[in-house]
Image: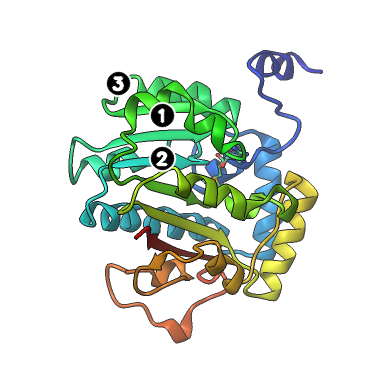
């Protein structure tokens, strides 16, 4: 192990294999990544040249989705698989509408913990849980959540850009259901996910599996099924750029990259 690898390893960060959070940081043009993460993205670019734009579409729909949920009366969010702090994080997007909004970020990447805590230390109404979202009981019982979230009031449960990292045997549906069971009527569920919408998507999925060790892109129907019986807001589950866009988007001319991730928001009645 090199000296630099040892230094990072002491913080629980392995720089010899790509991490989901750091690879996402690469495509968002962040600085918190290593050569191994950039090598993974280089491989993805060969399959989907627009992969950097795909990350941007996802961040843009995150902003629109958070604003929508606020318009529906949600004032507290649990952002599961939140990623490394970047520009326009959930609390910034939300608090520009209402400074009283509270946000708990949940992620299991040690790099997110280091950076998240540093940034959020100065941000009122936010906290970070370093935990595994696949264990809803433990996440929901963590003091950062029980201190900040009022479970008698609507909560926005966000699983944005994460469920394609869970394999079927990890029971993503059971995980979604467990979070939604913990929140009251008027709460919302916000999901975006990579979608097996093209031959390129299937190739990208193989690359995820080979280099990140996770990757199961679902069909539009499978993504829709995660919302169960909840009431989907218009326009339903659609490619990210088509979900309540700020301006007109020509559906007929969507590119492979624009259709790589699908998303939607539903309300618990
Ligand atoms: N939600 C953000 C967005 O869409 O802009 C970030 C998405 S990023 C692609 C996925 C994040 O999920 C990464 O930061 C990764 O560390 C985190 N993650 C992956 N598996 C996780 C798990 N089991 N528990 C908690 N976080 C996880």
User: Looking at the picture, how far across and down is residue 20, in whole percent?
Assistant: 63, 42
Residue annotated with mark 1? 145
Residue at mark 1: C-beta within 8 A of ligand 1: no
Q: Secondary structure at mark 3?
A: loop
- Say which mark, if any, is on residue 122: 3
Q: Residue at x 56, y 45 (%)?
A: 24
Vertical comparison of 109 with 245: above or below: above
Asked whether 266 or 7 is in front, the reply is 266
Q: Quadrant of residue 43?
A: bottom right
Q: For mark 1, does the 10 Å Cα neighbourhood hold few (<14), some (14 to 19), or many (20 or more) residues?
A: many
User: Looking at the picture, how far across and down is residue 51, in whole percent?
Assistant: 57, 59
Number of on-image labels: 3
Vertical comparison of 245 with 142: above or below: below
Q: Residue at x 34, y 57 (%)?
A: 65
Residue at mark 2: C-beta within 8 A of ligand 1: no
- Relative placement, left or right, of 232 versus 169 is left
Q: Residue at x 73, y 14 (%)?
A: 6
Residue annotated with mark 2? 78
User: Looking at the picture, how far across and down is residue 102, in whole percent?
Assistant: 29, 35
Whichever of labels 2 and 1 marks the residue nearer the N terminus, that label is: 2
């Amino acid at each position: 192990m090199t000296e630099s690898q040892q230094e990072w390893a002491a913080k629980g960060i392995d720089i010899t294999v790509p991490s989901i959070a750091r690879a996402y940081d690469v495509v968002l043009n962040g600085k918190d990544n290593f050569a191994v993460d950039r090598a993974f993205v280089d491989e993805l670019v060969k399959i989907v040249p627009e992969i950097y734009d795909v990350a941007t579409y996802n961040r843009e729909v995150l902003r629109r989705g958070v604003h929508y949920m606020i318009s529906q009366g949600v004032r507290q969010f649990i952002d599961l698989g939140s990623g490394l702090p970047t520009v326009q994080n959930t609390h910034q997007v939300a608090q520009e509408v209402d400074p009283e909004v509270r946000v708990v970020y949940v992620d299991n990447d040690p790099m997110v913990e280091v950076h998240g805590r540093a940034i959020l230390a100065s941000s009122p109404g936010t906290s970070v849980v370093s935990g595994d979202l696949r264990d809803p009981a433990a996440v929901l019982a963590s003091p950062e959540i029980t201190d900040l979230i009022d479970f008698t009031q609507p909560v926005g449960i966000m699983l944005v850009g994460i469920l394609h990292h869970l394999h079927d045997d990890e029971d993503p549906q059971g995980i979604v259901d467990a979070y939604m069971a913990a929140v009251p009527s008027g709460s919302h569920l916000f999901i975006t996910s990579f979608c097996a919408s093209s031959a390129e998507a299937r190739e990208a999925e193989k690359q995820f599996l080979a280099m990140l060790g996770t990757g199961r892109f679902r069909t539009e129907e499978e993504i829709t099924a995660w919302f169960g019986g909840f009431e989907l807001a218009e326009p339903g589950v659609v490619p990210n750029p088509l979900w309540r866009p700020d301006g007109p988007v020509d559906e007929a001319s969507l590119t492979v990259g624009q259709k790589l991730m699908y998303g939607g928001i539903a309300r618990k009645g």
